[in-house]
Image: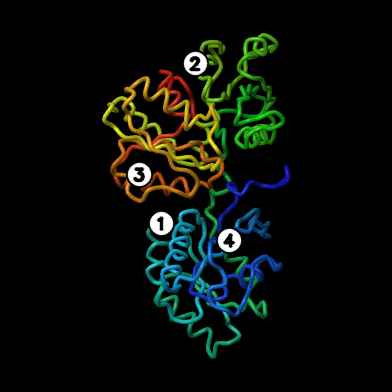
Amino acid sequence: MSIQSTPRASRLHIGLFGNRNAGKSSLINALTGQEISLVSPVAGTTTDPVYKSFELQGVGPVVFIDTAGLDDEGDLGQLRVEKTRQALEKTDLALLVLTGLPREELPWLDLLKEKNIPTLAVLNKRDQLEDPQALEGMLRETLGLPVLAVSAATGENIPALRQNLVKLVPDDFWDLTITGDLVTEGDLVLLVMPQDLQAPKGRLILPQVQTIRELLDKKCPVMSCTADCLETTLAALAKPPKLIITDSQVFPLVWKDKPEESLLTSFSILFAGYKGDIRAFLEGAAALETLTEASRVLIAEACAHAPTQEDIGRVKIPNLLRKKVGQSLTIDFVRGADFPEDLSPYDLVIHCGACMFNRRHVLNRIAQAEGQKVPICNYGVVLAALAGILDKVCHA
């Protein structure tokens, strides 16, 4: 990915769902005007979900999710369908691709409605239908959805499909910001940056880059330092910063040295609101006080990186939890797309900042935890709570 590229996690995710040979891949190619998805007359060409980043006119940076057929068969086919179900967790907008009256698609429509995913039914292969307008009307009545008949092969109604996609985008999708109303134009912001094995020499991690870019867009002066240079940096400033954003791991150090008038937060806490639901995470932090050595905690990481000796999720948070609760505390770990369907064995779920996930994915995990009455929190909130300053830090 180039430095100019919008990260995938910040793009609108458009999922295409339908039976084998409904023309999902062809539809992506028609929408983009490029051959970006493999097309074949052989049913089941698309197996695992394929993610394609693109700049869609009128919408902006998007990710198309090309999925396996909902009617796939056999043991391997069921595994592919399960992968499609997982892709649903990341979908912001859905195209339900049909070639006639729905059958296998109906249970998936129920799932889309249950998850409140804006959905457009696309009647593909319009050029092969005897009376596409009549079928459109029948589908609208049956599905309770807007329906548009198109032809990926001839391009008929593809411009109208793009226009309908624009209408489906939630009004506030592009308005969500990392720093919210914590700062406005002209406010000085100090970033206390982590420099450890997870942010090696020559690199900044994604939350830092995205935060800096947003602050520059807001026309805020930005200063950066590492934790060991905090005192020197503050002394060099003509006035205290309006906001200090720190690496969560050094909360106690920064809190001790920060000017009284400066607000304090962390990258992880900001991303808790930007990528998820800060309310749920703050409520989940209360479970830290009820943990015992008999408790069980799940730590979920979005990244699939190999853990290091300084790893915040695999090493530092577990050490702090066991110091507080006891060494017999059971802690399980999951990475990437892995996340248990059944969370009931856990007394607390602790999620990373999710810089590699889109917001829909994180919100679905929060909803899953809340639905099973399992508290869920995130790295930054947990670290602030364990440092005893959660009530003193701010969030967007």
Rounded to the nearest angstrom, the CA distance separating label 2 from label 3 is 29 Å
Q: In the rendered image of this protein, does residue 392 appear above or below residue 99?
A: above
Q: Splitting the image into 4 quarters, where does residue 216 fall?
A: top right
Q: Secondary structure at mark 4?
A: strand
Task: Check disc 3: other Cα within 10 Å, few if <14, some if 14-19, many if 20+.
Answer: many
Image coordinates of residue 231 in percent, x first then y, are: 63, 10
Q: CA separation, marks 3 and 4?
A: 27 Å
Farthest residue, direction bottom: 130
Q: Secondary structure at mark 1?
A: loop
User: Looking at the image, which is closer to me, 272 or 303?
Assistant: 303
Query: Label 1, on which residue?
Result: 115
Looking at the rendered structure, the kind of residue marked 2 is Pro
Task: Determine the CA span between mark 2 and mark 4.
Answer: 43 Å
Q: Residue at x 47, y 60 (%)?
A: 83
Identity, as a three-letter code, of the amino acid under mark 1: Lys
Q: Secondary structure at mark 3?
A: helix
Measured in 3D between alpha carbons, the distance from the residue under mark 4 to the one under mark 1, in whole angstroms, is: 21 Å
Q: Within 10 angstroms of label 2, few (less than 14), some, or many (20 or more) residues?
A: some
Q: Which residue is mark 4?
A: 50
Label 4 CA crowd tier, 10 Å (few <14, some 14–19, many 20+): some
Q: Please tell me the numbered disc located at residue 252.
A: 2
Percent across and percent down for residue 116 are 42, 57
Q: Name which of mark 3 and mark 1 comes first in the sequence.
A: 1
Which kind of residue does numbered mark 4 sit on?
Answer: Val
Instruction: Tell me which numbered mark, 3 or 4, is placed earlier along the sequence.
Output: 4
Q: Residue at x 32, y 29 (%)?
A: 329
Coloring scheme used: rainbow
Is residue 159 left or right of 123 when viewed as pictured? right
Measure how far apart labels 3 and 1 are at the Cα level: 14 Å
Q: Which residue is mark 3?
A: 369
